[in-house]
Image (tube, rainbow, N blue to C red):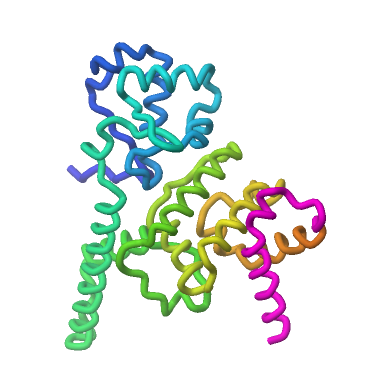
Amino acid sequence: MAGRARRKGVYAPLSAQYYLDDAILEAGPEAELLWVRILSFLASIPSDGFVTERQLKSVGLGLRSVPKRVRTLQEVGLLIAEPGGYVARSWLKWNKSVQEYNKELSTDRQRHASKSAEDDLNSERNPSQLPSDSDTQYRAEQSSTEQSSTSTSDADASDGGEFAPDVIRLCSLLAELVASNGHPVKTVGPTWWNACERLFRLDGYTADQVEWVMRWATANEFWSSNIRSMPKLREKFSELKARALTEHEKSRGKRSAAVNNNMDTVAFFAQQERLEVEA
């Protein structure tokens, strides 16, 4: 009997007897629902089990008395307060850490690169030899996993190794901003991380610049409905940057505190725009 096809997406497995946990029984059904939502959210992003105060607002969307439920989860020991948010009990006991995930991802890439090199060598020795069904499936799966927005320079890009902390942080932040706008967040993983890393390595932007444009786009009435992933942010980055700078120039003299605090980034973008025009 053929194996069942694996469904796409990220899942947050629960123990079949999770509801018999003393902490769950003590927390009650209202806090239990929030707890299940928190676990589902944490599984969708690289988190190490940490959920921020702001993320909790999105996770608890539509629920009443979310602060009360959070306090209950703390009292029974399911949530542990940390600066800026909470850590889910025993998360790293049952789930991989971000570091472990990045290490496995790096290993998979190296394995894929070695297999591709071996296949190329075999093809040179025997040009008529076609790849096996298993090789074709493997490559298709890798292509699907690593698919990202591309530019003319992406073909020569060599993504490898672990992702920088800023890459993980910015992808998590974008997921948080998208969710806070009431939009569903797709899987935050290699596709997002590669797109962000390429904004740094191939496109030449800094983490501060990416964050500045990201925050502007997700706060803009039009773009907040269109920018819902890191690949889309990268695809539209040049246009977003230009529009953000234009809006900044128009609003000079009545800037918000947030923009004033980021004037170094704005000044850099403005200087870069002038250099591009002069070139």
Q: Is residue 79 left or right of residue 183?
A: left
Q: Quarter of the image holding residue 119? A: bottom left
Q: Residue at x 72, y 49 (%)?
A: 256
Q: Position of residue 25 (x, y in %)?
A: 29, 12
Q: Is residue 8 above or below residue 163?
A: above
Q: Position of residue 20 (x, y in %)?
A: 24, 15
Q: Is residue 40 above or below residue 259?
A: above
Report the span colored magenta. Answer: 251-279
Does residue 258 belong to the magenta stretch? yes
Q: Is residue 205 left or right of residue 77?
A: right
Q: Residue at x 43, y 22 (%)?
A: 70
Q: Position of residue 55 (x, y in %)?
A: 49, 36
Q: Is residue 231 left or right of residue 107?
A: right
Q: Is residue 132 above or below residue 66?
A: below
In the foreground, 48 or 14: 48
Does residue 5 belong to the magenta stretch? no
Q: Residue at x 33, y 35 (%)?
A: 12
In the foreground, 216 or 263: 263
Q: Position of residue 51 (x, y in %)?
A: 42, 37
In the foreground, 134 or 274: 274
Q: Is residue 90 left or right of residue 186?
A: left
